[in-house]
Image (cartoon, grey):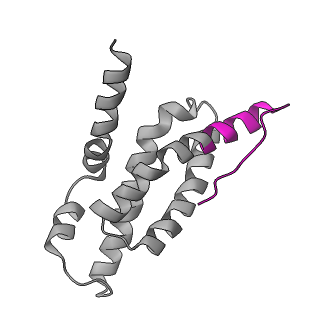
């Protein structure tokens, strides 16, 4: 997925916010995609569609007045990715468009924030190891 490539010369504060959100989203996209496909068991095309909606949400989220820098919103991005996926899958299961799957059912019963923390744990360990020296 191609996410907003904006040059960095002569950026206004608003452009800078949008670029920051785009950069954080791009950096997080692999983790987001893995969460959607492996944890929430979305098919690849479903995951890509959800990622596009999530990108629009994240850019708006980062533009709110008083919003912290985009890098500080990464956890919110992961939680929202899990919320999006959970809502999508619950709808499909409840309407009968997705067959019952015990592994998926366990994930759908969990708090999306808990799933996001679990998914991001390996990155936190890596960050700690790189910066604890």
| 58 lies left or right of 31 | right
Vertical order, 33 against 23 (above or below): below
Furthest residue to the bottom? 96
Residue 72 percent coordinates (x, y) = 49, 31
Residue 129 visible to an observer of this rendering: yes
| Count of marks overlaid on the render | 0
Front residue of this view, candidates 52 and 5: 5
Instruction: Examine the image and state in which quarter residue 123 appears.
Output: top left
Instruction: Determine if the magenta segment contains residue 6.
Output: yes
Q: In which quarter of the image is the C terminus?
A: top left
Between 19 and 97, the one lying in front of the other is 19
**Image-based side of 93 in relation to 59, left or right:** left
**What residue range appears in magenta?**
1-22
Does residue 65 lie above or below 92 as drawn?
above
Considering the image in quadrants, where does the N terminus appear?
bottom right
Q: Which residue is drawn at 36% across and 70% down?
A: 42
User: Residue farthest to the top?
Assistant: 133
Q: Which of 40 and 93 is in front in this view?
A: 40
The answer to if 121 sits in the magenta stretch is no
In this rendering, position of residue 59 left or right of residue 88: right
The residue shown at (64%, 34%) is 65
Residue 80 at least partly seen: no
The image shows residue 33 at horizontal and vertical percentages of 42, 58
Q: Where is residue 122 shown, x and y percent of the image? A: 29, 38
Q: Measured from the top left, where is residue 15 in percent x and y?
A: 76, 38
Residue at image x 18%, y 76%?
101
Q: Which residue is drawn at 34% across and 79% down?
A: 92
């Amino acid at each position: 997925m191609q996410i907003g490539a904006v040059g960095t010369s002569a950026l206004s504060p608003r452009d800078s916010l949008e670029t920051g959100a785009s950069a954080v989203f791009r950096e997080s996209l692999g983790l987001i995609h893995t969460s959607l496909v492996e944890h929430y068991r979305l098919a690849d095309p479903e995951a890509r569609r959800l990622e596009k909606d999530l990108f629009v949400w994240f850019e708006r989220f980062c533009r709110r007045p008083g919003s912290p820098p985009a890098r500080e919103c990464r956890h919110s991005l992961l939680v929202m990715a899990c919320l999006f996926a959970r809502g999508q899958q619950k709808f499909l299961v409840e309407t009968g468009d997705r067959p019952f799957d015990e592994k998926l059912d366990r994930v759908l019963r969990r708090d999306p924030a808990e799933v996001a923390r679990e998914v991001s744990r390996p990155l936190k360990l890596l960050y700690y190891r790189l910066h604890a020296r």
